[in-house]
Image (cartoon, rainbow, N blue to C red):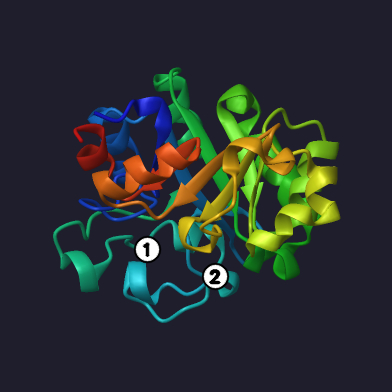
Amino acid sequence: MIHPSKLVAHRGYQAKYPENTALSLTKAIKAGAVFIELDVQFSADRLPIIYHDVDLLRVSGTDLSVFLADRADLLCQPAYEPARLGNKFIDEKISPLEILVDILVANPQVTAFVEIKDESVDHCGREAMIQSVMEILQPVKQQSVMMSFDYPLAIAAREAGWPMVGVVLKSWDDLQHPELALALPDYIYSNYNIIPDQYDLRNSPQLAAAQLVTYEVGTAALAQTLLGRGVDMLETFEIEVLLGA
């Protein structure tokens, strides 16, 4: 069995439910997750929604950019992943970021990794994005890690005083990137495939002050291999499978 403290439910319980929905997040917690991850994009009126893609087609079945619709309209759209899950969850809707506050207040044992999508930077600007997310998550800031592929955004979150910050590596060589040192990340996310085979994770000075989280881990065998190498945490769509492994 892999301890819950080693696992992050990627976009909630995505293997069984439509990703980044309130349903998916709460089902992951019910399955035993104490760490969940979700994505944040921004609407035309520059308000945050829990959503991964820029386009609504894959998750909502509508060929429309999130940047071209106001949040009130987006919240009426389904979030059901029709190609993967059919119409089973068609009644699920896109959620505002505020729903995460309710989920975390109801589950004080849970920490959320909130990935602010870098595609929204040009649309909104980093300062506006950080301020919006901070204002909403203030009641649960001790349960929320603000993170991004956009290193300057992580730096801005740190400089704004957010208690926990993470970065997602674009390449393994970016461990040496000067902006990572400025961000002082508590968590460093990486695709497990980009970690060099001979890299000594346990003795890496770049990883000494951060927890290394790898994605996307779907099997117990891979999970045990990565933990054995010194990876701290594993992000997975299959939270229940790995909790029972």
Crowd band around label 2 with a 10 angstrom C-alpha radius: few (<14), some (14–19), many (20+): some
Say which element carries label 2. Answer: loop
Task: Looking at the image, tell me whether mark 1 or mark 2 is earlier in sequence order.
Answer: 2
Say which element carries label 1. Answer: loop
- From the image, which quarter does the N terminus lie in? top left
As rendered, which of 122 and 151 lies closer to the eye? 151
Residue behind mark 2: 69
As rendered, which of 45 and 224 lies closer to the eye? 224
Q: Is residue 79 above or below residue 184?
A: below
Q: Residue at x 54, y 57 (%)?
A: 195
Q: Which amino acid type is marked by label 2?
A: Ala
Quadrant position of residue 228? top left
Q: Is residue 148 left or right of residue 110?
A: right
Q: Residue at x 40, y 21 (%)?
A: 107
Coordinates of residue 47 in the picture (x, y in percent) = 62, 54
Q: Is residue 20 left or right of residue 195?
A: left
Q: Do the residues labelled 1 and 2 touch (CB within 8 Å)?
A: yes
Q: In this view, does 39 lie to the left or right of 137?
A: left
Q: In this view, does 80 lie above or below 224?
A: below
Q: Which residue is drawn at 25% across and 33% down?
A: 243
The answer to whether any part of residue 97 appears in the image is no
The answer to whether any part of residue 116 appears in the image is yes
Coordinates of residue 105 in the picture (x, y in percent) = 47, 21
Q: Which amino acid type is marked by label 1?
A: Gln
Crowd band around label 1 with a 10 angstrom C-alpha radius: few (<14), some (14–19), many (20+): many
Residue behind mark 1: 77
Cα separation, mark 1 vs mark 2, equals 11 Å
